[in-house]
Amino acid sequence: MTPLEIGLTLFGTLLGGGIIFWMIQVDGHFRRYSRDAAAERAGQATQMMLLIDEVGRLSDDCAALIHTQPKLKGLISAHTSISSLESSLDSEIGSPSIREAAEQLLVAIRGMLATHPTDGDFTQAEEKPDSGVMALANRLFSLFAELDIHGPKNLGLTALEARRLGEIAHELGEDAWARACYKEVASNLAPGNLASMRCLATLAKDSADIEEEAHWVGEQLSQLPDDVDLLRRLSVLRPETAERNVQRLEALGKATPADHSFVSGLKERLQGDSSDHSLAAVEAAIEQNPTIDQYLLKSRIHRRRDEPLLAIDAVELGLELPGGRQNGEAWALLAHLLCSEPKRLAEALKAAVHACALDAGGTDMMLLKAELLERSGRPDDSFEWLESVLEKDSSNSIIRSEISQMHTFHGRRTEAWAVIEDAPNWGGPELHIQKGRLLLADYDANRDAGHSDTDILAVAEATFREALESDRECGLAWLCLGRCQRLAGDIDEATISINRARRLMDDPMIAAEESLIAIDEGRIDDAARLIDEADITESKSLVIPYVKGLVAAKRGSLSEALDRFNEVLMVNPHHVRARLNRITLHLLAEDVQTALDDCDWLLMTYPNLLLAKLRRGEALIQHGIFDEAEREIRTVLQEQPENEVALTRLGACLLAQGRADEAFQPLNNALNLNPDYPEGYYQRAMLYLEMGEADSALADFKTTAKIAPRHIDALLRVAAIYHEREDFQEAEVAWRKVLDADPDNKLGRARLDEVRISLAKTA
């Protein structure tokens, strides 16, 4: 064999041996691993059997627990359905369909309600839902809110299930849901169900809805006509039925002296009877059986007869009776009686504190307590009190709105917005109204800065309309809507809204708003009458003296107008519109330095207030400081290049400096922006006069008088031009127009006499 063959043979032998050795090793490892795997599988099988036995025991234990505690089955079912629906809603893949959500909700509701076997009447002393049910219910109502479900109408519940759901909702504080559940039962599922009607009456009573409570009490009486408690309650809610109800009690042999005295008191109130008959009946009942209720009735009669001291005495006597001091209604009445007595403010506050502690008087009493704290020099305590009320009942939109308004009054606009934005629900009109007020405050601030932001005004109007969608009978919403429409220049619609507000409520601010509309329409006498009407019943609002100042200024009573604006600024130095108007009055009175002082105060307080800069420019022109005046006006024009007022003032300033050629451009720009701006035509006419172009000046003066028929300076200029030209026929007409606008104008009367003499000589 050759060496190559020997080498190949040797290599093949070694390779074959290596492969055989490797296969032997692999086989050994495989056998070892097989033995280990078999042992591990045996161990796992043993553990699995133990686990199966344990699960079986747990299953048996759960079955035993469910059999011994049947409620758990429903709770588990409800929990499973709610968790499944929550997961579906949180899933990024897609939310469940309405049908699927409704099916899961129905399973959850029925599982939960099955654990609460009551009649669903929370007015009766039944078993309260346990903590497990309440926890599930809380999650369930969160799902309702997320799915935009506000009532049980389409949930497929039985009458009993709907009542139980209403009871749980009431326990959770979800009274809107409770009301919807019981109404669904009383109206559709089981008409005439007494339990539902009792609950609806109680819910209405808790929310101080007298009409709603009276309706459901009446519905109960239709089935239980001899129920003494219902008859007496209906008498309180619907006084016009009291006499008939007492007659029914007499027929049943259940009428008492207190019932008769109650009817007497109602007659005195409803018929305006000022005799002693009603009072005598109440006093007779007190003599026979003195009770706190009788003393309260006696106090109310004295109050209606305008006998406040006797009314206070009656309440205090009632409070001295056994248990009288625990009567919250008595403390509430005493607080109302004392709140108008400045010397007894501390007693009024004490009574309000007691009333609130006893949950009497409702939201009105809470607000009265806050007002009394404020009047007692404790504004921080007033604010803290309202915040504590809101913490206990975050859904109280009236309190939330009041807190927001307090923030607004103290200049905390961010906090004012935050309070209403944190509201858990917007069911009533109050928060919509407050939001609209904040938007109007933004609009006023922008307007004061020279920016009339119509977009904000449109949003505010939409907000007030949302309030009206919630309650069409809300007079305050109509009033605020009318103000929006007036500011937007829609006087006809504003008038309609204000008239609706007047039909719905008696508020002096309605007359004040009507007065502003009359000012806008040039009906100054009507404006004066209306603001005087508001002044009779409203003494606190700064709107009254402010509007009175506007009326006085329109009438030419500059000193009275100045006094009114001073009155406003004494109370609120930051009333920008009043200070701007006062600046104008000072300029008209040629008190330039005082006007400049007001301008400087505004610019120190509000550095970006363009109207203040413009007024300062006007004052400097009048003071003869033209360079600085021009700088102020040009600063305004840098921010608002299309401000026709600033352009006109710039033209007047340039004209006063003898720069007539430069004055034309800003005046023409102003008139291009607003062809109906009378002051622009007047200043351009003055420019034409300066340049000796009398015909052009006359045309612009006439245009000014056409746009503003009472522009006395333009009327005087027109008459003077005709007079100088000895065009006496035209001059006579022109001087008569001067006297029509200002009957006491001495120059006009003297020149008219001259014209008449001249015409008589040429006749």
Image: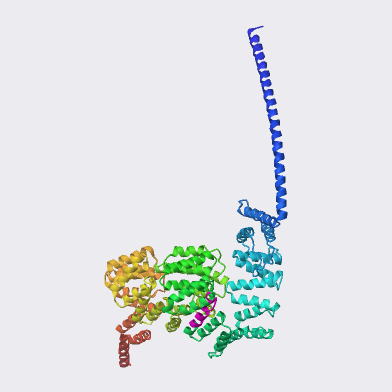
Residue 413 position, x and y percent, is 44, 65
Using the image, determine if residue 137 lies above or below residue 207. above
Q: Position of residue 110 (x, y in %)?
A: 69, 60
- In this view, the residue in front, 482 or 249, is 249
- The residues colored magenta run 312-325
Give the farthest residue toward the front.
Answer: 322
Give the residue displayed 66% in from the left and 73% down from the top: 197
Q: Quadrant of the C terminus?
A: bottom left
Give the quadrant of residue 162.
Answer: bottom right
Q: Residue at x 64, y 77 (%)?
A: 215
Residue 224 among those drawn in magenta: no
Residue 320 belongs to the span the image colors magenta: yes
Residue 86 position, x and y percent, is 62, 54
- The quarter of the rendered structure image containing the N terminus is top right
Q: Position of residue 454 (x, y in %)?
A: 47, 68
- Residue 57 seen anywhere in this rendered image of the structure: yes
Residue 200 or residue 103, whichever sits in front: 200
- Magenta: main secondary structure equals helix
- Residue at the (71%, 77%) spot, across then down: 223
Front position in the image: 387 or 692: 387
Q: Quadrant of residue 686?
A: bottom left
